Image (spheres, rainbow, N blue to C red):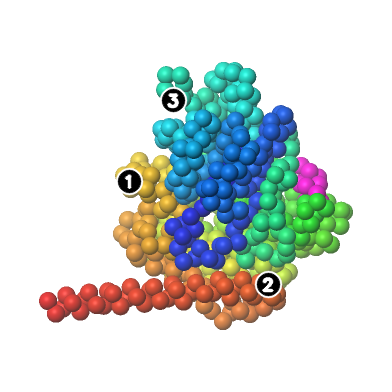
Amino acid sequence: MLVNTPIDQGSILGKFGRVYNTMKMVPTGLAYLASSSRKHGIDVHILDQYAECLSIQEIENRIRHFSPDLIGYGATTPNYFVAMTMLKSLHSKFPHIPVVMGGNHATIFPDEVLASKEVDFVLRGEAEASLPELCMALERGNRLDEILGLSYRDKNGCIRHNPDAAPVNLDSLPWPAYDLLPMSLYDSPIYSKFAHPVYQMIASRGCPYRCSYCINAIEPKIGGLYRRRPIVDVVNEMEMLVEKYQARQIQFWDPFFPLGKKQALEFCEKVRERRLHEKIVWCSTTYADLLDEEMINAMVKAGCRGLGFGIESGVPELLRSINRRSDLEKVRNACKIARRYGIVIGGAFILGLPNETKEMTRRTIDYAKSLDLHYAQFSMFVPYPGTPLYQQLKNNGELRSIADGDLHRINQNVGLTDNDLIYVPKGRNSGELKMWQRRAYREFYLRPKIVWLHLPHLNLSKILQMLNSSLVIPGILSARLGRSVQRNSKRNQAGLE
């Protein structure tokens, strides 16, 4: 049984949690693990606890009904603490069922994860090959020391780490096991939703770039090596989702898709050959610098409705410092062309990067506003464990050790919560940076121009979702007012004393 673990949106997103209440998206990673295991004759069940909003009691009932020989959990760093809390509760009821954990957090911290008696095995990196091998080894009593990517406790209780597994060959992977998922429950956030049903899939893995803040910079341990699926196989999967699950939109998970003119034009040609552009729309995230008018025109004709760009900063020297190869004028030009062709554009920015000053933060927000984006995401810089920047800051003594109780703060939206930031650049403080994150959202979205940008793309469903999301803004403004009143009260009290 593979379990998609829960996310505590309150601790990760604060009042903004309601904006992302539709973020129940296809867990493609688990679905690939399931299909790869089935390929080897293993009976698999997926329990999407997050999408189904299952209680602990309901999960217990599912486990009893399926009676698995092995339970697999995946966890990222922000939701690791929540996942472990659930796992410990379940382990008390099913102590005889071995547990394997995967995902970025377990890959980077296998010793810490295996220090918990509730976890028996860790599969580091991509596990489509190693999970079936582990299942068969447990069934047949085979040796564990030959399974690449496996960490485990031996008979003496000592933790062993087998050599890393090689990155998976995407050509050999079966499609995700969509039939094991509650497909009717999946959706997309408002900023990337253009039709319904909408499902997520991938056309590639890894990334060709090595930005120092990104987990993909660790190659190939986390699967950061860039690999592409054959375009015809991608289009075949899209066609299957249309025919079997009535998909009306595909959202590509890839860090960058399409990446480069050749891939873009080939993909668009295949989509139009199958006439899929008449049945579905699609959106993706890609590298703005590589787009030109020919590519955007072809993408729109093939059904592209939305593009996301990881822009990160409006300050060239900060981009260079994080090994981000972006030309801000090329980004501006790509946004201009995409908007002219009717594409809805979103941009992602990072605030609080190392050596960032208040003036630089201001420049990034102003640059974001100048691009006439439909949506913008302003994330706090988080030194995710395992990334080059994390190691650099730790070596320089700028980052203290992170305890389990701090893990919920390792998320890019922590500035929207009541928690302090896990990292603050020299000369700055947590409260001031959190103020800038809130201010960025207020300045970007509370502009009359935003209304005009969105008017051509609105429908009833999107209007209702935007109204629901907008109810968060008064809460943020009132919270800010409350803090201001509290500060003034303290100053007045101090004056009286």
- Which secondary structure, mark 2? helix
- Per the model, the C-alpha gap separating discs 3 and 2 is 52 Å
Q: Quadrant of the C terminus?
A: bottom left
Q: Nearer the viewer, residue 95 or 279?
A: 95
Q: Any mark on residue 159, and which?
A: 3
The disc at residue 322 is none
Choose mark 2 or mark 1, whichever is in front: 2
**Front residue of this view, candidates 41 and 449:** 41
Q: Is residue 238 magenta?
A: yes
Q: Earlier in the sequence, mark 2 or mark 1?
A: 1
Residue 400: give its label: 1
Amino acid under disc 2? Ser
Residue 19 colored in magenta in the image: no
Q: Quadrant of residue 341?
A: bottom right
Say above or below: 136 vs 291. Answer: above
Marks 1/3: CA distance? 25 Å
Q: Nearer the viewer, residue 48 or 436?
A: 48
Q: Residue furthest bottom?
A: 448
On screen, residue 207 versus residue 40, left or right, reads left
Extent of the magenta region = 230-240
Q: Position of residue 399 (x, y in %)?
A: 34, 47
Q: Which mark is residue 461?
A: 2
Q: Amino acid at mark 3?
A: Ile
Q: Residue at x 63, y 54 (%)?
A: 25
Counting other residues with Cα less than 10 Å from the Cα at mark 2, is it few (<14), some (14-19), or many (20 or more)? few
Q: Could you tell me the amino acid type at mark 1?
A: Arg
Question: Which residue sits at x=69%, y=31%?
Answer: 42
